[in-house]
Image: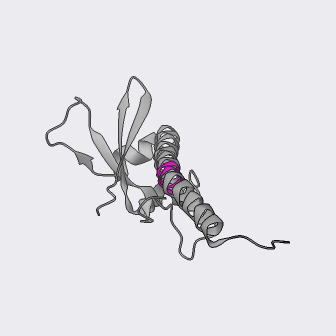
């Protein structure tokens, strides 16, 4: 007798096998995507801080006289100047993300605009140092 097609048992076995493979693969793919997003976030923070340091070195006199500084409790014995990320973008040291509906630098995890943050800048031995003060929760 000539048999055509698959039996119900064979189809169910294939379905179970595909389900098991899916159960193994999906969490791995999600973990990899989260890891990539976190890496992209860290890269953007580093990019903002390096651009801020360039801005601070080129615009030192301007920063010293035009931006408020933090005289409160601090770890380092230097004045810390607070510069909005938007000012660093306006000065041409950073670019907005391309392809977004509104201008900004977006966190790939929370999709919030990092350009709303503040960069804390201080000077030590004629070198500028910058730290992005921005929270995903803000």
Q: In the drawing, does residue 48 fall left or right of residue 14?
A: left
Residue 121 relative to residue 75: left or right = right
Please tell me whether residue 79 belongs to the stretch shown in magenta: no
Q: Main secondary structure of the magenta part?
A: helix
Quadrant in the picture for residue 113: bottom left
Identify which residue is drawn at 18% across, 36% down.
74
Residue 79 pos. (x, y %): 26, 37
Quadrant in the picture for the C terminus: bottom left
Q: Residue 9, percent across and down?
A: 60, 67
Q: Quadrant of the N terminus?
A: bottom right
- State the residue in front, 91 or 2: 2
Residue ranking furthest to the bottom:
101
Q: Residue at x 54, y 53 (%)?
A: 25
Q: Position of residue 96 (x, y in %)?
A: 57, 62
Q: Nearer the viewer, residue 114 or 127?
A: 114
In the rendered image, the vertical position of residue 50 relative to residue 3, given as above or below: above
Q: Is residue 11 visible?
A: yes
- Residue 96 visible, this angle: no
- Front-most of 95 and 21? 21
Residue at 57% from the left image edge and 77% from the top image edge: 101
Identify the magenta region: 25-32
Q: How many marks?
A: 0
């Amino acid at each position: 007798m000539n048999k055509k097609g698959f039996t119900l048992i064979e189809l169910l076995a294939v379905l179970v096998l595909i389900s098991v493979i899916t159960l193994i693969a999906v969490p791995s793919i999600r973990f990899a995507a989260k890891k990539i997003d976190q890496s992209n976030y860290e890269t953007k923070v580093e990019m903002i801080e390096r651009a801020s340091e360039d801005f601070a070195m080129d615009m030192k006199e301007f920063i010293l006289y035009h931006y408020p500084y933090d005289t409160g409790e601090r770890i380092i014995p230097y004045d810390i100047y607070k510069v909005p990320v938007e000012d660093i973008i306006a000065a041409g040291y950073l670019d907005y993300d391309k392809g977004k509906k509104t201008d900004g630098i977006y966190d790939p995890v929370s999709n919030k605009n990092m350009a709303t943050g503040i960069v804390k800048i201080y000077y030590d031995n004629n070198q500028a140092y910058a730290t992005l003060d921005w929270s995903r929760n803000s």
